[in-house]
Image (cartoon, helix red, strand yellow):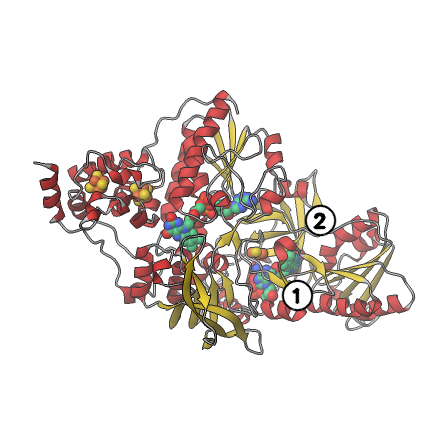
């Protein structure tokens, strides 16, 4: 059959939807929203891939997964083969299959997307990973013989975990230092249970432990121990993957009223400290009835959907640009909308209003219109004179981005930073300006994506391995 | 897991706990704090490091029972372990020779003040310590503070241990008595720190307070601990906990500390029902 004919035939099978909890039901519980594919659905979806000779999809994946190869295995029902293929390039497939913005990455460039709908690459990746976890025993790959070199990884987010997983297989002795007790970074304290169950992250961390990676929680590098002290303790190389852990506030009047949270605090309380199970768990969170969330990225969608699940009657996302500019994944926006989150577009907050007790009771906003494109290429919001309006609310979550946390870098003055406080790292290797120290993920790029943080980790791991075996 | 080496009830509802924590003992400086989580269900609570011992690899804190987490923690004993303990956090107290220093402590602050008074004394200052308690039976560490102070003034709310009064009364007496104080440190409950700052202001004496806003991570990640100082928003965990008491917006701090007033009551009720059944 000619490729063209094959393609036409495949286009007749529609992209397989993933079954999920009904919006009304799920908006009130913290269980995962989609259920995942059954083996039959996965095989059917896999059969839509036409196995391109020059597969464009791979160019869309930041870690170059051999997408047609793993999909072919799923189609044949060889799920073990499929997951093995994925794991050649991606150590956290159950995570990426769930949270990658596929619509701008692999699926964006899938050839089937030109005319119809792309192959559901992310859902298939998730299927393969979930299938493997359900089998129980995950096979432990052969490790290279010990090199006797010690590597310290600072931060246990996706970039740190990638570095640790790669270097342990190459025979190095790896310890991950983490400020919190539980490893996983944003995957555990930021992204909520209903989107990424914590048991999945725990399983990935468990797998790393089995490989021999050591995790030392409760350790704030820069406070408990410094980078230089790690070298003194005998570490030969250090990777810094501490993420973008600095909340950005609006800087408007009334922001210290009770009921106003940074997204970091709101999500950390709910996810990591399990405030959604209060009072069974000790950490409280304000269960507002009328919640406003500022910003329209993934973090905002997660905050808004968390507020609903905590029992809010009304949740509104206030965003100063229009729908087209919203940075969140399409699926998250869609899910939020289905669950009843309202969008107040082209509006920006001016100040908060409090009651006599210092509690938030309202908000003053201003309407915006879109002007000329700014440096980011998005059209700049411009305030409309005389369009101010007031609205009531009892809880607000500020989710307009995250900056670089200076705690570690202040204690390591010989590492160079850019003007935003992000670590400067060589794009090809992840090397910082300090000998023996690499960095990657959100602390270098600013808040980005899981897969980019992993890609940076992979690159740095290769460079660290070269250094440990060949020299700086 | 972090092991409890010593646990002692100093006075009713006030407990001393010594933890095994060698890494923190090596690093701790006066004025710094730790954050602990007692068990899986516990809240993250900040506590000031009241003492440390590098050879033993231990740190000591003194805490007061106020809400659920501290009441549950009070039921732990030597030999038990808690889940999480992280530190040392916060900017250390600035220790230098300035002349005469007044170290003010109330409730847990009597213990929390110890390392600062000791270091200020070692730096060559004249140290006057002033501590208060509601009543004689709530007073602790008097001898310990006496040892590191040139003068120790004790005051009790009910006069059960002379003289009767509170810290502001004592401060006023000191200043009006002609003592030329160069610096004041105050640690303890928020009202006491506020009143101490208000008392010293007319005398123009710089007053350093240790702010105790509600915290989560303690590393500058969440912004929960934000306070308003000199018209600017600061994070108490990383920009402090020490601030100039004359610049602090006390109303914001006191208000934000009430954030979870209703939840705290609910939490206590839930815990009490569990406690009757014999679990912490
Ligand atoms: C709510 C939310 C939703 C998101 N949704 C998506 C999504 O759907 N898809 C997607 O691709 N991306 C998403 N992102 C972005 C993505 O999670 C991040 O880009 C990614 O986690 C960055 O990984 P990292 O390893 O660089 O850092 P992080 O995941 O931030 O991990 C850094 C770790 O370092 C620790 N640490 C910090 N300082 C220190 C120190 N001094 N010492 C020791 N440890 C330290 C932190 O506690 C943390 O555990 C989301 C982010 C958030 C906050
Ligand atoms: C830097 C710092 C150092 C401190 N040092 C000590 C100390 O050495 N000894 C001591 O007894 N106490 C100290 N505190 C106060 C102590 O953290 C609180 O008493 C404790 O968290 C109360 O917890 P709870 O669950 O028992 O009470 P809750 O029922 O939660 O609260 C009772 C009151 O305690 C305050 N509080 C609650 N949670 C927190 C939190 N996570 N962080 C701060 N305050 C909170 C609130 O104002 C609340 O009104 C310190 C606080 C800070 C910020
Ligand atoms: S890792 Fe992400 S980008 Fe790569 S194939 Fe999987 S879902 Fe697509
Ligand atoms: S581009 Fe699409 S159809 Fe082609 S190989 Fe990749 S997934 Fe299959
Ligand atoms: S406690 Fe989170 S920023 Fe201070």
| Quadrant position of ligand 4 | top left
Q: Is residue B208 visible?
A: yes
B202 left or right of A443?
right
Residue that numbered label 1 is attached to? B231
| First-in-chain label (2 vs 1) | 2
* Residue A126, horizontal then vertical, whole percent: 28, 45
Q: Which mark is residue A121?
A: none
Q: Are marks 2 and 1 in contact (CB under 8 Å)?
A: no
Residue at the spot 52% in from the left edge and 63% down from the top edge = A250
Q: Quadrant of the N terminus of chain A?
A: top left
Mark 1, secondary structure of its residue: loop
Decide if ligand 2 comes within 8 Å of the CB at mark 2.
Answer: no
- Judging from the image, mark 2 belongs to the subunit labelled B
Mark 2, secondary structure of its residue: strand
Judging depth in this view, the residue of A96 and A295 nearest the camera is: A295
Residue that numbered label 2 is attached to? B51
Is disc 2 in the same subunit as disc 1? yes
């Amino acid at each position: 059959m000619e490729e063209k004919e094959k393609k036409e035939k495949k286009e007749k099978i529609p992209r397989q939807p993933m079954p999920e909890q009904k919006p009304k039901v799920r908006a009130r519980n913290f269980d995962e929203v989609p259920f995942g594919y059954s083996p039959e659905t996965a095989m059917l979806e896999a059969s839509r891939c036409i196995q391109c000779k020059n597969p464009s999809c791979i160019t869309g994946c930041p870690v170059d997964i051999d997408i047609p190869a793993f999909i072919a295995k799923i189609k044949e029902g060889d799920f073990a083969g499929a997951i093995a293929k994925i794991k050649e390039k991606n150590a956290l497939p159950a995570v990426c299959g769930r949270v990658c913005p596929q619509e701008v990455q692999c699926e964006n460039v899938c050839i089937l997307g030109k005319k119809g709908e792309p192959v559901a690459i992310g859902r298939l990746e998730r299927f393969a990973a979930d299938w493997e976890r359900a089998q129980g025993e995950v096979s432990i790959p052969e490790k290279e013989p010990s090199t006797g070199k010690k590597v310290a990884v600072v931060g246990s987010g996706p970039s740190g975990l990638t570095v640790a997983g790669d270097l342990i297989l190459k025979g190095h002795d790896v310890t991950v230092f983490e400020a919190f007790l539980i490893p996983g970074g944003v995957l555990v304290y930021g992204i909520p249970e209903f989107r990424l169950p914590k048991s999945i992250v725990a399983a990935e961390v468990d797998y790393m432990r089995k490989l021999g990676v050591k995790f030392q929680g409760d350790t704030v590098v820069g406070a408990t121990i410094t980078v230089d002290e790690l070298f003194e303790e005998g570490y030969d190389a250090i990777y810094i993957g501490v993420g973008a852990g600095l909340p950005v506030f609006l800087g408007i009047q009334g922001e210290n009223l009770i009921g106003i949270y940074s997204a970091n605090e709101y999500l950390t309380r709910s996810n990591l400290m399990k405030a959604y199970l209060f009072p069974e768990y000790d950490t409280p969170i304000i269960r507002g009835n009328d919640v406003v969330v500022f910003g329209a990225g993934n973090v905002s969608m997660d905050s808004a959907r968390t507020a609903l699940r905590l029992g809010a009657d009304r949740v509104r996302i206030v965003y100063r640009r229009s729908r087209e500019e919203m940075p969140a994944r399409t699926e998250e926006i869609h899910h939020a909308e289905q669950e009843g989150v309202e969008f107040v577009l082209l509006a920006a907050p001016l100040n908060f209003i409090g009651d006599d007790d210092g509690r938030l009771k309202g908000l003053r906003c201003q309407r915006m219109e879109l002007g000329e494109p700014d440096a980011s290429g998005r059209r700049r919001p411009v305030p409309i004179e005389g369009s101010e309006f007031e609205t009531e609310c009892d809880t607000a979550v500020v989710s307009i981005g995250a900056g670089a946390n200076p705690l570690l870098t202040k204690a390591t003055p010989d590492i160079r930073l850019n003007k935003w406080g992000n670590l400067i790292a060589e794009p090809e290797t992840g090397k910082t300006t300090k000998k023996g120290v690499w960095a990657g993920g959100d602390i270098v790029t600013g808040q980005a994506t899981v897969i980019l943080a992993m890609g940076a980790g992979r690159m740095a791991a290769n460079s660290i391995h070269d250094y440990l075996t060949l020299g700086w | 897991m972090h092991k409890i080496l010593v646990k002692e009830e100093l006075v009713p509802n006030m407990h001393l706990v010594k933890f095994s924590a060698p890494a923190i003992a090596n690093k701790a400086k006066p004025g710094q704090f730790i954050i602990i989580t007692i068990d899986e269900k516990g809240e993250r609570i900040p506590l000031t490091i009241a003492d440390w011992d590098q050879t033993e690899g231990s740190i000591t804190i003194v805490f007061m029972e106020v809400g659920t987490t501290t009441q549950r923690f009070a039921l732990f004993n030597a030999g038990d372990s808690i889940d999480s303990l992280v530190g040392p956090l916060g900017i250390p107290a600035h220790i230098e020779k300035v002349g005469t220093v007044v170290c003010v402590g109330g409730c847990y602050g009597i213990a929390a003040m110890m390392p600062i008074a000791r270091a200020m004394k070692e730096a060559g200052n004249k140290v006057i310590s002033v501590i208060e308690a509601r009543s004689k039976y709530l007073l602790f560490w008097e001898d310990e503070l006496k040892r590191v102070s040139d003068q120790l003034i004790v005051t009790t709310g009910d006069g059960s241990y002379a003289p009767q009064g509170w810290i502001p009364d004592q401060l006023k007496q000191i200043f009006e008595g002609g003592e030329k104080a160069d610096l004041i440190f105050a640690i303890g409950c928020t009202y006491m720190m506020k009143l101490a700052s208000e008392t010293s202001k007319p005398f123009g004496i710089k007053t350093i307070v240790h702010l105790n806003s509600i915290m989560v991570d303690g590393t500058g990640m969440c912004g929960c601990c934000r306070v308003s100082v000199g018209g600017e928003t600061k994070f108490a965990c990383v920009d402090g906990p020490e601030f100039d008491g004359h610049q602090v917006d006390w109303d914001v701090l006191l208000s934000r500390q009430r954030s979870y007033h209703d939840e705290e009551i609910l939490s206590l009720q839930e815990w009490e029902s569990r406690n009757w059944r014999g679990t912490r």
